[in-house]
Amino acid sequence: MPLRPFALLLVSTVFTHAAQAEVHEVKMLNRGAEGSMVYEPDYLRIAPGDTVRFLPSQSGHNAASVPGLLPAGAEAFMSRLNQPFEHSFTVPGTYGVQCIPHVAMGMVMLIQVGDAQATPIPGNLPTRAKDRFAAQLSKLEAAR
């Protein structure tokens, strides 16, 4: 195969994969449809390779992975306060996300990547965070 057609085939294959990945936006809010200190939406089901863009619509928020709610082989992440943040989710599984300053107020969300089974909620979380995760897990089960 001549070099030029091979190079074009290689480039088109790489860009086709990149074009298939989606970017999902999540707002970090002081008040939303589900109450105070929330991510909207608070549950996402995405494909492996998709990216989530966390947008601090109001100040004082961040997005960080929850220890114990992270699939094996996935890297932990944490954004800076008040900064937009993007994270690509490549490992299938259920990810817990928390706003570190407001986790005690229940500011958490779930991201399901692929068709992974639900992960048990860690017992060391504040009560409001556990309650919101339980509500989000019911959305995960309803989506099946």
Image (cartoon, helix red, strand yellow):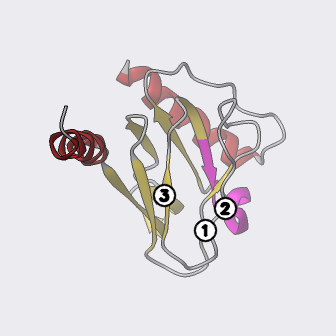
Circles 3 and 1, Cβ within 8 Å, touching? The answer is no
User: Is residue 21 found left or right of 129 in the rendered image?
Assistant: left
Label placed on residue 62: 1
Q: Amino acid at mark 1?
A: Asn
For label 2, the residue is 78
Upstream in sequence: badge 3 or badge 1: 3
Q: CA distance from mark 2 to mark 1?
A: 7 Å
Upstream in sequence: badge 2 or badge 1: 1
Q: Is residue 103 magenta?
A: yes
Between marks 2 and 3 in the image, the one whose residue lies nearer the viewer: 2
Residue 25: x %, y % from top left: 36, 59
Q: Name the secondary structure under disc 3.
A: strand
For label 3, the residue is 39
Kindly identify the residue that appears in the image at 44 percent across and 21 percent down.
115
Answer few, some or many: residues within 10 Å of disc 1's Cα (few below 14, many 20 plus, some between 14 and 19).
many
Q: Is residue 66 magenta?
A: no
Circles 2 and 3, Cβ within 8 Å, touching? The answer is no
Q: CA distance from mark 2 to mark 3?
A: 15 Å
Residue 2 vs 32, above or below: the answer is: above
Kindly identify the residue that appears in the image at 51 percent across and 55 percent down.
87
Residue extending furthest front?
2
Between marks 3 and 1 in the image, the one whose residue lies nearer the viewer: 1
Q: Which residues are magenta?
A: 96-106
